[in-house]
Amino acid sequence: MIVPKMGMGTFRLTGATVIDAVQTALEVGYRAIDTAQIYGNEAEIGQAIANSGVPHHELFLTTKIWTENYAPEQLILSLKQSLQKLGTDAVNLTLIHWPAPLLGIQIEEVMQALLHAKQLGLTEHIGISNFNIALTQQAINSIGLEHIATNQIELSPYLQNQPLVAYLQQQEIDVTSYMTLAYGKVLQDPVLNTIAQQLNASPAQVALAWALQQGYAVIPSSTQRTHLLANLKAQDLQLSPEQMQAIAALDRNSREVNPEQLAPEWD
């Protein structure tokens, strides 16, 4: 895998909150941080990294280009601005945040602009986010499979999206799961709670371990040291085939994030 299996997500974290959270995450051992231009927190993350003293070469930084920056010149310019905010010459991974078909986005044009950013040395790897099968295939056709490191998509026990996952794994594109806890909804689930008791773990750890065991990278978000540590420890859990099967049965195609103008038609 190109994408580290465990990272820290920063969606909806801003200001002093995100500085504290990222510093704490780096202190307890995280080395992968996921952000995006639209989160409005790149400068604060850059500050947290500087405060932490962790050298950039030890980190795996991901950012995502926002829709208004998809025009080729604007993509490069906006990524340079992101790098400045993050306090680095290059990030490890840059993603197209949403395919936005209803905005008339030309996938081929935006992917070629992203590839150009990679060729300029602004980003080590590139990839996509929230792309369905057809649009992922378009991205592959535009720039070649070897350039697409990951598709970052919403996946949780309640949204397992098997057709898309199977397609990505067949293509050997890393699957990054966001919203793995479905905004905390899965934490109340009786099946996850039963498994958590069996393993002497928390329901959050069970959900993350389920994703990790499927071969996905995860980027859970937390501001609390105890939760950040607990999320890291999910990597040590081993679910039995029966437990994995019980979680597989929870799929209800329940999507938390589906912005009308930006999302594709899901598989």
Image: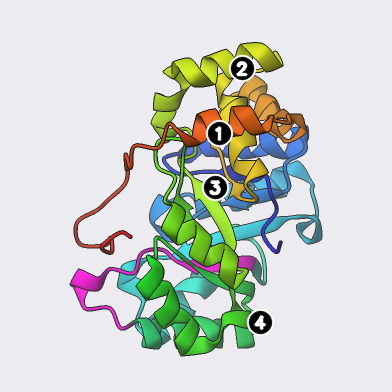
Which image quadrant for residue 160?
top left
The Cα atoms of the two marked residues, 4 and 1, are separated by 43 Å
Left or right of residue 151: residue 21: right
Count residues near mark 4 (Cα–Cα under 10 Å), then give few for <14, some for 14-19, many for 20+.
few
Question: Depth-wise, is mark 1 or mark 3 nearer the camera?
Answer: 1
Q: What residue do we see at 50% from left, 72% from top?
A: 79
Residue 44: mark: 3
Q: Position of residue 170 (x, y in %)?
A: 58, 68
Residue 228: mark: none
The Cα atoms of the two marked residues, 4 and 3, are separated by 23 Å
The kind of residue on which mark 3 rests is Glu
Left or right of residue 9: residue 188: left
146 and 63: which is toward the camera: 146
Q: Name the residue carrying label 2.
A: 196
Nearer-N-terminus badge (4/3): 3
Nearer-N-terminus badge (2/1): 2
Question: Depth-wise, is mark 4 or mark 3 nearer the camera?
Answer: 4
Q: What residue do we see at 65% from left, 43% from top?
A: 212
- Please provide the residue range marked out in magenta: 92-106
Q: Answer above or below: position of 253 versus 169.
A: above
Q: Name the residue carrying label 4.
A: 121
The Cα atoms of the two marked residues, 4 and 2, are separated by 44 Å
The kind of residue on which mark 2 rests is Ala
Nearer-N-terminus badge (1/3): 3
Which image quadrant for residue 100?
bottom left
**13 in magenta:** no
The Cα atoms of the two marked residues, 2 and 1, are separated by 15 Å
Q: Are marks 3 and 2 in contact (CB under 8 Å)?
A: no
**93 in magenta:** yes
Residue 245: mark: 1
Q: Which image quarter is the C terminus in?
A: bottom left
